[in-house]
Image (tube, rainbow, N blue to C red):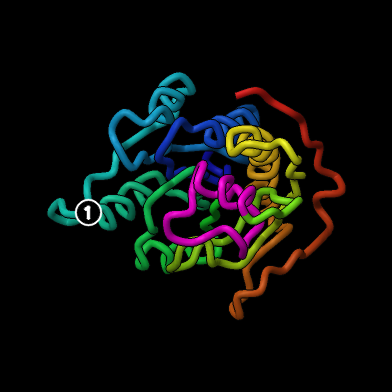
Amino acid sequence: MSDAVRIAVLASGGGSNFQALVDRFRRSPEREVVGVIASREGAGVLERARRAGVASAVSPPASTSGGAATFLRRTLDEWRSDIVVLAGYMKLVPEALVRAYWGRILNIHPALLPEFGGRGMYGARVHRAVIEAGVRITGATVHFVDEAYDRGPILCQWPVPVLADDTPESVAARVLTVEHRILPAAVEALASGAVRLEADRRVRWVREWFETETFTNREG
């Protein structure tokens, strides 16, 4: 696997998007999920990593000597990470880490950015805001990470309908199914060179890619 693109994940919760990445690349000789860093002890993603045989670590609190920023950078460097993926990661990525992995760090957000994003907009809060706004289309967004919450250049989006009788929970379930499809595809696009982030922050698709992608449903 020495020539494989090495993918590291940051997560805070149950880790179903981490699982989607593991499932996608499990048998690939060219891609490898090398580790996951959880933002807290007890996060469900740690058990998923154990079952998958993937390395894991828990980031210390920011108040710890050296801080979370140093820990993140050191651990990602030790794993020789090529791409970093935020999969339900609730912390702001330190600026130094953004600079180190500029153009190689992605986030998945459960709405169509730039709406319904920013500090404090995660989980059920996003879906409740979508319903209260009366919009009829929501979705999932994969974007490059910069120094602010949910502000980085958008790589791709997938729309999801909002139905008249929806609750935050029903919207969340529908969007999560899409997240499991679009995130591994976006990571593959970046790893394969189909898409890249230019110096002027513009996302450039070098070649058509999603037309040949097979999206499969999964439970998780």
Residue name at image x 44 percent, y 27 percent = 49
Q: Residue sitting at 43 percent across and 41 percent down?
A: 11
Is 73 situated left or right of 201 in this image?
left
Is 117 inside the magenta-drawn segment? yes
Span colored in magenta? 109-132
Quadrant assignment for the N terminus: top right
> What amino acid is at disc 1?
Ala
Give the percent coordinates (x, y) of residue 156: 70, 56
Along the horizontal axis of the image, is 87 left or right of 47? right
- Residue 119 point in image, percent of width and height: 43, 60
Residue located farthest toward the right when viewing the structure as drawn: 211
**Which residue lies under the disc numbered 1?**
62
- As helix, strand or loop, the secondary structure at mark 1 comes to loop
Q: Is residue 125 above or below residue 29?
A: below
> Does the image show residue 205?
yes
Which is nearer the eye, 148 or 66?
Answer: 148
The answer to whether residue 205 is magenta is no
Whole-percent x, y for residue 201 in the image: 60, 75
Image point 75% across, 40% down: which residue? 163
Quick one: quadrant of the C terminus? top right
